[in-house]
Image (cartoon, grey):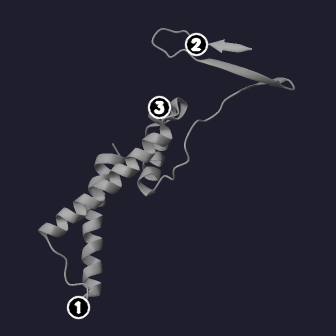
């Protein structure tokens, strides 16, 4: 059995079904590469799933969700690295050897500032 969707403005899709007992089950497969999604990709996925359900469903059904999450994660990590380097150039950290706790606190503070921007601009928009 085949189902054709020929409505104007929609992609033509052909779905085949396999009979199992009294049920017809669609023959669906996902074509995604299995790259790992990092912290920022998972945050984006959770946001889309809970707050932007239409966008999440659209990306999932079109097979572009994994690619979108991978790109968001890659962009966020790149932005984090570049922003941290720029902030450290403008505002150098205390000496790590003489004040390790001060250095750790300073670096954590910088990272939190940068992450706040990343979360606002890339993840939760």
Q: Label 2 to label 1, Cα distance in Å? A: 69 Å
Judge by depth and name the residue closer to the eye, 46 or 99.
99
Q: Which residue is mark 1?
A: 98
Which of the two discs, 2 and 3, sits closer to the camera?
Answer: 2
Q: Quadrant of the C terminus?
A: top left
In the figure, is residue 50 to the left or right of 82? Answer: right
Give the residue number, with chain letter if any, for mark 2: 5
Q: Return the residue found at the far left.
A: 90
Relative vertical location of residue 25 with respect to residue 74 in this rendering, above or below: above
Quadrant showing the N terminus: top right
The local crowd at label 3, few if under 14, some if 14 to 19, many if 20 or more residues have their Cα within 10 Å, is few
Q: Residue at (14%, 71%) from the top-left corner?
A: 91
Residue 20's tag is: none
Could you tell me which residue is drawn at 70 percent across and 14 percent down?
2
Residue plotted at (44% across, 45% down): 69
What numbered label is drawn on residue 54? 3
Q: Earlier in the sequence, mark 3 or mark 1?
A: 3
Q: Position of residue 59 (x, y in %)?
A: 48, 34
Q: Position of residue 113 (x, y in %)?
A: 25, 63
């Amino acid at each position: 059995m085949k189902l054709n969707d020929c409505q104007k403005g929609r992609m033509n899709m052909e779905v085949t079904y396999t009979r199992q007992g009294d049920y017809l089950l669609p023959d669906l497969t996902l074509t995604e590469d299995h790259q790992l999604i990092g912290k920022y990709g998972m945050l984006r996925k959770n946001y889309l799933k809970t707050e932007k359900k239409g966008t999440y469903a659209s990306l999932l059904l079109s097979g572009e969700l994994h690619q979108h999450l991978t790109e968001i994660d890659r962009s966020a990590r790149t932005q984090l690295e570049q922003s941290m380097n720029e902030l450290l150039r403008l505002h150098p950290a205390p000496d790590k050897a003489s004040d390790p706790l001060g250095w750790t606190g300073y670096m954590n503070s910088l990272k939190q500032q940068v992450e706040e921007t990343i979360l606002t601009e890339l993840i939760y928009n």
